[in-house]
Amino acid sequence: MTAFIYPNAKLIAGVDEVGRGPLVGAVVTAAVILDPNNPIEGLTDSKKLSEKKRLKLAEEIKAKALSWSLGRAEPEEIDQLNILHATMLAMQRAVEGLHIQPNFVLVDGNRIPTLSMPAQAVVKGDSLVQEISAASILAKVARDLEMDELDKQFPEYGFAKHKGYPTKLHFEKLTELGATPFHRKSFAPVARCLAK
């Protein structure tokens, strides 16, 4: 992990999102301020971890972090704002939800939301910055659990398997069954399905 050093930044929050690409459900974000005196081993990009390892780390992050918060933007907001602006809004909500105010924020990717404190975007930050890795794990675990719940409501779509991403199975089910109320109507494959 790269150590990012910022003058006078005692409390650094890492922010990441999960769910920009799926056709269904919210985009989920997390903000995490880690405790430098209580390190967590094995933090990395959530996509590189097994589900079992992610779940274990998520519990450890929640127990050891100085503060953590989830943010989200619902499918209706994504349709209204577009996915980029909805993601920025969800990131703002995650940072605002922290019970400790950070004095610096590191955001995964190449854009930063409008925040009340200084921030920097870090490309591939979920592999480089521990705080962002922790945020990516919390967001991924939260969104995957939501997809598992949605799978119980709509078992025929296979949400537990593909987590809402545009897979062959998901396209087949969209064509066969139509969209659920939780699908993102502005996304082209869903819009095409609704047009029929």
Image (cartoon, rainbow, N blue to C red):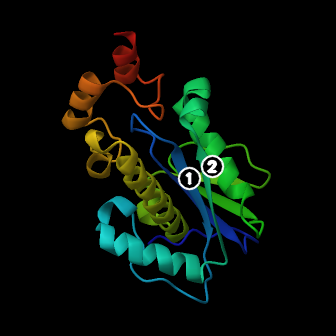
* Residue count near mark 1 (Cα–Cα under 10 Å), binned few <14, some 14–19, many ≥20: many
Residue that mark 2 sits on: 91
Residue under the image location 47 percent in, 35 percent down? 182
Residue 176 is marked as none
Where's residue 155, x and y in %?
30, 45
Residue under the image location 38 percent in, 27 percent down? 179
In the picture, measured across the screen, residue 133 lies left or right of residue 88, that is left
Q: Amino acid at mark 1?
A: Thr
Residue under the image location 69 percent in, 50 percent down? 93
Where's residue 77, x and y in %?
61, 32
Residue that mark 1 sits on: 29
Where's residue 68, x and y in %?
63, 68
In the picture, measured across the screen, residue 89 lies left or right of residue 152, that is right
Quarter where residue 137 is shown: bottom left
Where's residue 180, x and y in %?
41, 31
The residues bearing labels 2 and 1 have C-alpha atoms spaced at a distance of 6 Å
In which quadrant is the C terminus drawn? top left
| Proximity of marks 2 and 1: CB atoms separated by less than 8 Å | yes
Outermost residue toward the bottom? 37
In the picture, measured across the screen, residue 36 lies left or right of residue 129, that is right
